[in-house]
Amino acid sequence: MASLARAVAVMVSGLTADVLVLPPRGDDLAGALYALANEARAMRRRVMVFREACETAAARCDAFGRGAPTAESLVRLLSGRPALTVASAAEAMALSTPTAGAAMERLADAGVVREITGRGRDRVFVYAPAVVLAG
């Protein structure tokens, strides 16, 4: 008897995929499928909240004047890689470290990212909408 298995796609790089194995019996299968449907609806709601938060974050960049395009690019990068250092952001965006750092600081001041290391150097910034998604 074969079990029904479904791999949940990785939504954000760096996370591992979960696999759900459903029982082959009819009565157990119906309950498992119902639970799976509820889980899928809950995840869909979380993804919608994440997308709305990403749009809000991008809109906040409009207030940054000349730094808006860089900050918007950084927000797009953060939506796929929710934890970055300034150096990794600079490398990924082909920018100088001071330019990437200024954009990251603007986003931190706007509440779009949060610094989590408490260090002065090699700080790691986490994208706030991704924290909502993971929560």
Image (cartoon, rainbow, N blue to C red):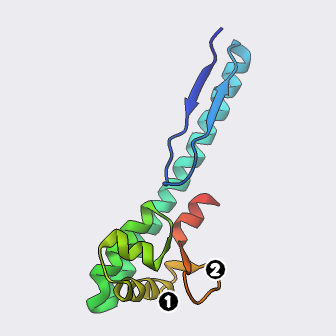
134 to 76, vertically: above or below: above
Identify which amino acid the numbered label 1 is placed on: Asp
Q: Residue furthest right?
A: 28
The location of residue 49, given as percent across then percent down, is: 51, 61
Dot 1: few (<14), some (14–19), or many (≥20) neighbours within 10 Å?
few
Helix, strand or loop status at disc 2: loop
Asked which quadrant contains residue 71, the reply is: bottom left
- Quarter of the picture containing the C terminus is bottom right
Which residue has dot 2 on it?
A: 117
> Depth check: 96 or 30 in front?
96
Q: Nearer the viewer, mark 2 or mark 1?
A: 2
Identify which amino acid the numbered label 2 is placed on: Thr
Count of numbered tags? 2
Which residue has dot 1 on it?
A: 109
Of mark 2 and mark 1, the one earlier in the sequence is 1
- Quarter of the picture containing the N terminus is top right
The location of residue 94, given as percent across then percent down, is: 29, 74
